[in-house]
Amino acid sequence: MQLGTIDRGDDRPPYRQIAAQLRDAIDRGELRAGDRLPSEAELTRHYSVARMTARQAIQELRTEGLVVAEHGRGVFVRLPAPVRRLASDRFARKHREAGQAAFLAEAEKAGVRAQVDQIEVSTAPPAPDVRERLRLDDGDSVLVRSRRYLADDRPIEVAVSYLPAEIAEGTPIAEANPGPGGIYARLEDAGHTLDHFVEEVTARMPTGDERRRLELPDGVPVLVVVRTAFDTTGRPVEVCDTVKAAPAYVLEYEVPAR
Amino acid sequence: MQLGTIDRGDDRPPYRQIAAQLRDAIDRGELRAGDRLPSEAELTRHYSVARMTARQAIQELRTEGLVVAEHGRGVFVRLPAPVRRLASDRFARKHREAGQAAFLAEAEKAGVRAQVDQIEVSTAPPAPDVRERLRLDDGDSVLVRSRRYLADDRPIEVAVSYLPAEIAEGTPIAEANPGPGGIYARLEDAGHTLDHFVEEVTARMPTGDERRRLELPDGVPVLVVVRTAFDTTGRPVEVCDTVKAAPAYVLEYEVPAR
DNA sequence: CAGTGGTCTAGACCACATT
DNA sequence: ATGTGGTCTAGACCACTGT
């Protein structure tokens, strides 16, 4: 690729100018996804700057999520993550009746091999926000189901469900494998016919723990979706807190104009 | 605040250990939102490290979005952004009939002073994704409405709407101020009664241009919402591409269980 | 003015991946 | 063995903020 020069008259510091030239090369398609950037040594020679200056330029692009550094190999233009579209019908009863949990139903549609691991089930007192969403009283406890989802062996989502212990205890919901159709099918077995869900969507940078579990590189935000399930009596019967690798997802919702 | 020491036996490098100690102090509440962190000089003295090492620890926290550096003043624990909840009824007809555009209706409910600026209107050939969403033919052009939204004088969202030129031209939609109820009210005036919207939600790090327009510090992702409006004939009549400062928003959607 | 963070230099040693 | 990025040192000068 063709590198430019540093303009001392430019009001931007040299490292930003270098970053801008690399960014432009990516935007123009001169550097494509998977291509290696010039090494730090090449940048220091070409621009006649110290190595830390070249590194700072690359750091800029890393925090923008444009490139990924691989120790010992080089810095590469990020590959676009395979996108999973989550349609608003993903919790439709037809999927449960077909014996599939929502995640597996979606994955199959996309032709992706889906797995679930790191399943942990426990009972505990709820955090304040969960307690409020489930409209529980002081002293009530909740069943906690934590798990991680993988698509083609890459972790893409961690999720924690909270259900009133009073509903879930002694049912298959408290087992690691709740059976065909997932916990929503079991809730309906137990007489809690589902009416609707409310999803609250935000985005933020991941915590260190989330970065590890989702194997996220620098500069990748997460989508946080908190879903509350309501049965036909209007009672909230589950809160599910999910953290998704943002570039891997598009969430789709249909909103009536009334 | 109380600083610890560096453990040479720890497998983490010193700068990560320093970052972890500062992060813990924030998590424990020893450092609260708005508090100043120890200065780089204080960190280098306390831990007996070079200044770049102390800076790297702080850089870590900045890209996590935990702290914000202010030149000449110090590094501060980030203040939580005032959250705007966007309910799924925000495009309800009742708001339009009350003469309010969606953004202003939402803002008023939250007790926030809302403004719109940087309004630009033009006509242009559509980008491929817009053309596809609006189901346009080759050669069709679109009306482009670009603007920025502010809440209490802080920019929180930039938006670009695309409408088929055939529909919008010669109507108030092509004016900077389309009148009471916004462009959706004008679409309905023109016989395009709105039926529903489809919103596609993703998150990513902002581009440099978006960082400037939204005045975002380091480590803050954006929520990208692409909304397509359909009229009662099933025709897509508008695509609106919005970029929002992620920490300032919670998007809320209701999903039927069917 | 003193104190803060922003940028830069010119080295050094290390860990990792490839040949 | 070579080339890559990761970490660190010990300085330097600059720009911004406050008193």
Image (cartoon, coloured by chain):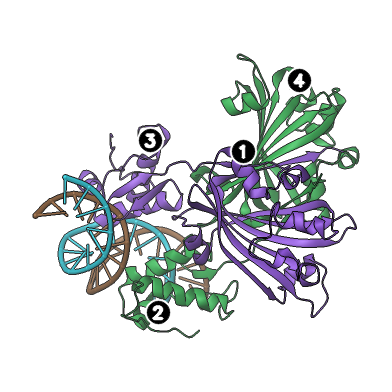
Chain colours: A purple, B green, C cyan, D brown
Amino acid type for the residue under numbered disc 2: Glu
- Res B156 visible: no
Q: Which residue is mark 4?
A: B167
Check the image and report above or below for B105 versus B131: below
Q: Chain of mark 3?
A: A
- Residue A143: quarter of image: bottom right
For label 3, count other residues whose C-alpha is less than 10 Å away and answer few (under 14), some (14-19) or many (20+). Answer: some
For label 2, count other residues whose C-alpha is less than 10 Å away and answer few (under 14), some (14-19) or many (20+). Answer: few
Outermost residue to the top: B139
Check the image and report above or below for B106 versus B178: below
In percent of width and height, residue A237 lies at 80, 62
Dots 3 and 4: beta carbons under 8 Å? no
Numbered circle sitting on residue B42: 2
Depth check, front residue: D12 or A122? A122
Depth check, front residue: B20 or B171? B20
In percent of width and height, residue A97 lies at 75, 46
Residue at 78% from the left image edge and 32% from the top image edge: B183
Q: How far is the residue under mark 1 from the one under mark 2?
A: 56 Å
Amino acid type for the residue under numbered disc 3: Arg
Residue at 63% from the left image edge and 25% from the top image edge: B132
- Same chain for the residues under marks 2 and 3 in the image: no
Q: Chain of mark 4?
A: B
Q: Which residue is mark 3?
A: A32
Q: Which residue is mark 1?
A: A109
For label 1, count other residues whose C-alpha is less than 10 Å away and answer few (under 14), some (14-19) or many (20+). Answer: few
Badge 3 or badge 1: first in the primary sequence = 3
Q: Nearer the viewer, mark 1 or mark 2?
A: 1
Q: How far is the residue under mark 3 from the one under mark 4?
A: 38 Å
Dots 4 and 1: beta carbons under 8 Å? no
Dots 3 and 1: beta carbons under 8 Å? no
Q: Nearer the viewer, mark 3 or mark 1?
A: 1
